[in-house]
Amino acid sequence: MHLILLGVFIGTGALGLMQMAAVQAGAAFLASIVPVALAVILVPFLFYRLLALQRSSYTLERDGVHLMWGLRGEDIPMEAVMWVGDAQDLGYPLPRPFTSLPGSVLGVRSLPDGKPVEFLASSQRGVVVIITPQRAFAISPSDPAGFLSAFRRMAEYGSLKPVEARSVYPQVLISRSWSDRWVRILLVGGLALALGLLGWVSLEVPRHAQIALRISESGALAENLVPGIQLMLLPMMNIVFFAADLVLGLYFYRHEETRPLAYLVWGCSVLASLLLLGAVFFILRAT
C-alpha cells in the first residue's frame, strides 16, 4: 500500500513538473503546482512510514518487552506490565486512530479511564494491548495467540535483571541532529537558499512576459521563447530536492557510521540551490 501511494504521488508530482514546463498560461501553471505541492508534503511522510514498517519489531524476553517502530522505541520492564491481552478482552471498545493505513496504524487515543493508548501496529485486526501504569500500547503481532503464549511463558520464568524503562521518540533524533553545528549550517543554509530562490523568481516573473531558455550558437536568443511563468519551475524543483534531502539526511544521521552520508546529502541540497540560482541569473541576463 505504501509503495503504491508513493508511486502515485511521485508520478503525479513528476507529471506536474512536466506540465509546468509545457504550459503556456499562468492559470494552467498554477494548477500544475498542486500535484507537486502534494508530493512535497506527502512523499516524505509516506517514505518515513514505509521505512518504519520495515524495521518494526516486538521483542519479548524474560526481563521485559521491546517495541520498535521507526524512530519510536519503547522498553518496558516485565514488572511494569499490568495486563496483556487481546483488545476484544478489554471489556470496552478500543478507540481507533483517526488516520491509519494498512501497514501504518499509528496514533494516540485515550481509554475510558483517561490513560493514553499508543498504536504501534500494522493492522487493526488481531490487536494486542499492553497496559502499564503510565500508558497502554496497541500492537499487532503476526501471531497474536503465539505472542500472548510467549509472554505468559516469559513472565512465569521471572525477571533476573529488569530492563531499564526507556522511551525514544522521533523528536529526540531531530533535537540531537539540531545540536550539531554543521547540521544547522547546512539545513538553515539550504532552506534560506531555497526560499530566496523562490522569492527572487516570484518577483522577476511579473517583469518578464517571456524568457529564453536557450541561446543560439551565434549568441542570439532562440526563437522559441516561453512564458515567463515557466521560470517558477526551477524554484519548485529546488523545493522538491530540499524536502527529499531533508528526510534522507535524517535517515542517514541516525547511526554514526552513516552520518557522513547525511552531511553529503544536505551539502548536495545547498549545492543544488546554488546551481539553480546561477541558472536563473543567466536566464534573466540572456533574456
Image (cartoon, grey):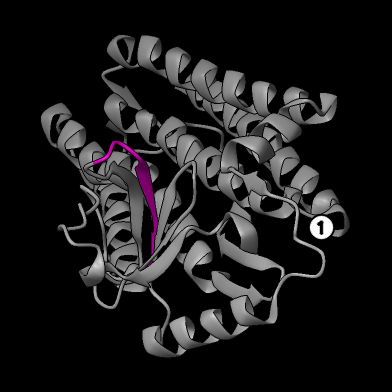
**Position of residue 155 measured from the top left corner of the image (x, y, whole percent):** 60, 76
Q: Nearer the viewer, residue 246 or 147?
A: 147
Q: Residue at x 78, y 25 (%)?
A: 179
Of residue 37 and residue 234, the one placed in the foreground of this image is 37
**Residue at the spot x=70%, y=40% of the render?**
266
Dividing the picture into quarters, in which one does residue 30 lie? top left
**Horizontal and vertical percent for residue 147?**
47, 83
Residue 195 appears at what percent x and percent y?
A: 50, 19
Q: Quadrant of residue 6?
A: bottom left
Residue found 52% across the figure and 81% down from its top: 152
Q: Which residue is mark 1?
A: 258
The quadrant of the rendering that contains the C terminus is: top left
Q: Residue at x 14, y 32 (%)?
A: 25
Q: Is residue 231 above or below residue 241?
A: above
Total marks placed: 1
Please, what is the dominant secondary structure of the magenta stretch?
strand
Quarter of the image where one finds residue 231: top left
Quadrant of image for the N terminus: bottom left
Residue 218 at x, y = what percent?
56, 38
| Helix, strand or loop status at disc 1 | helix
Residue 257 drawn in magenta: no
Label 1 packing within 10 angstroms: few (<14), some (14-19), many (20+): few
Above or below for 155 versus 75: below
Say if 139 sits above or below 216 in the image: below
Amino acid found under the numbered disc labelled 1: Thr
The answer to whether residue 77 is seen in the rendering is no
Is residue 141 at least partly visible in the picture? yes
Q: What range is drawn magenta here?
A: 113-121
